[in-house]
């Protein structure tokens, strides 16, 4: 699998960190995981085309994770001289269909040449040769994390989350854990993880590498998050930057 960070930030506007979004290639498919504002442009910066995307996976419907959906679908439907004939899938938690009807369909016209297949993921589904698993996270009513597996390799993407045992079980042995590290320890707020909690989850789950993402601006320097996480986790710790690439 190949992963590109499109947005390592949050709802807070930043010139350094775009709103949440990731590009994931695997199992013969090209996916977007979360689609915050600016995802379409970040994809272009990453040298990838929105026309090639097969499916969008959404962790939850907070605006920083979904507000790029309208421009994304609109671009697929309305780019001059381009007629998409392949359907596209949008996969998310309970309520994603209702969210789409209310917040996306209501403002853009229905594409004429392709369909949008919406599905609410239960615990597991396959897309191409990729196995996808989901688990509820402690954050909002419908927030979930995803685990993508191909040929024995795995990446877990938590979306927004707080500390819980289910997430540790879900992340067991992952090659890469992309995790909500909203704050350094001193600024912890409920519903998000701080850097030590990220490290504890990674350590107990025995993951190989952790990528701290969903970075809120903070008065503390970036390296504080790394230091706090490394104090409790012995594996590789990286702080996400936009357009970082990983081979998994
Ligand atoms: Zn968020
Ligand atoms: Zn959220």
Image (cartoon, grey):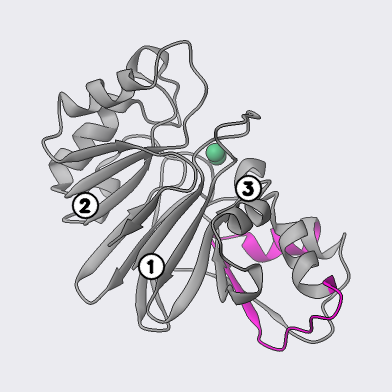
Label 2, on which residue? Answer: 169
Some atom of ligand 1 lies within 8 Å of the CB belonging to the residue at label 3: yes
Q: Kindly state the secondary structure of the residue where label 2 is placed.
A: helix
Q: Is mark 1 within 8 Å of ligand 2?
A: no
**Residue at 80% of width from left, 65% of height from top?**
74
Marking on residue 36: 3
Which residue is drawn at the image coordinates 32% and 35% (left, top)? 163
Instruction: Name the quadrant containing residue 98.
Output: bottom right
Label 1: few (<14), some (14–19) or many (≥20) C-alpha neighbours in 10 Å: few
Q: Secondary structure at mark 3?
A: loop
Q: Secondary structure at mark 1?
A: loop
Instruction: Tell me the number on the disc at residue 240.
Output: none
Closest to the observer, 187 or 21: 21
Using the numbered discs, state the Cα–Cα distance from disc 2 to disc 1 in whole angstroms: 14 Å
Q: Which mark is residue 123?
A: 1
State the residue at coordinates (67%, 56%). 40
- Seen in the picture, residue 139 relative to 135 is either above or below; the reply is above
Whole-percent x, y for residue 171 in the image? 25, 53
Between disc 2 and disc 3, whose residue precedes? 3
Q: Is residue 81 above or below residue 3?
A: below
Q: Is residue 206 left or right of residue 99?
A: left
Magenta stretch bounds: 78-102
Q: Nearer the viewer, residue 231 or 103?
A: 231
> Horizontal placement of 34 versus 131: left or right?
right
């Amino acid at each position: 699998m190949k992963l590109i960070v499109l947005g390592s930030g949050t709802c807070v506007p930043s010139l350094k960190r775009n709103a949440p979004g990731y590009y994931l290639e695997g199992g013969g498919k090209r996916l977007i995981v979360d689609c915050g504002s600016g995802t379409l442009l970040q994809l272009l910066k990453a040298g990838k085309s929105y026309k090639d995307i097969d499916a969008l996976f959404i962790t939850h419907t907070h605006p920083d994770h979904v507000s790029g959906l309208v421009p994304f679908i609109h671009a697929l439907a309305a780019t001059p001289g381009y007629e998409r004939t392949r359907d596209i899938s949008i996969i998310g938690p309970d309520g994603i269909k209702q969210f789409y009807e209310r917040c996306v369909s209501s403002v853009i016209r229905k594409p004429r040449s392709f369909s949008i297949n919406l599905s609410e993921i239960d615990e597991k589904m396959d897309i191409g040769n990729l196995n996808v698993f989901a688990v509820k996270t402690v954050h909002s009513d419908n927030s979930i994390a995803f685990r993508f597996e191909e040929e024995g390799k795995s990446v877990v993407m938590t979306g927004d989350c707080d500390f819980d045992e289910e997430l540790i079980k879900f992340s067991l042995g992952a090659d890469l854990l992309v995790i909500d590290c909203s704050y350094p320890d001193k600024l912890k707020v409920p519903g998000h993880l701080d850097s030590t909690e990220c490290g504890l989850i990674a350590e107990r789950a025995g993951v190989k590498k952790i990528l701290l993402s969903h970075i809120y601006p903070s008065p503390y320097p970036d390296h504080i998050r790394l230091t706090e996480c490394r104090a409790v986790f012995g594996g590789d710790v990286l702080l996400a930057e936009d357009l970082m690439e990983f081979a998994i």
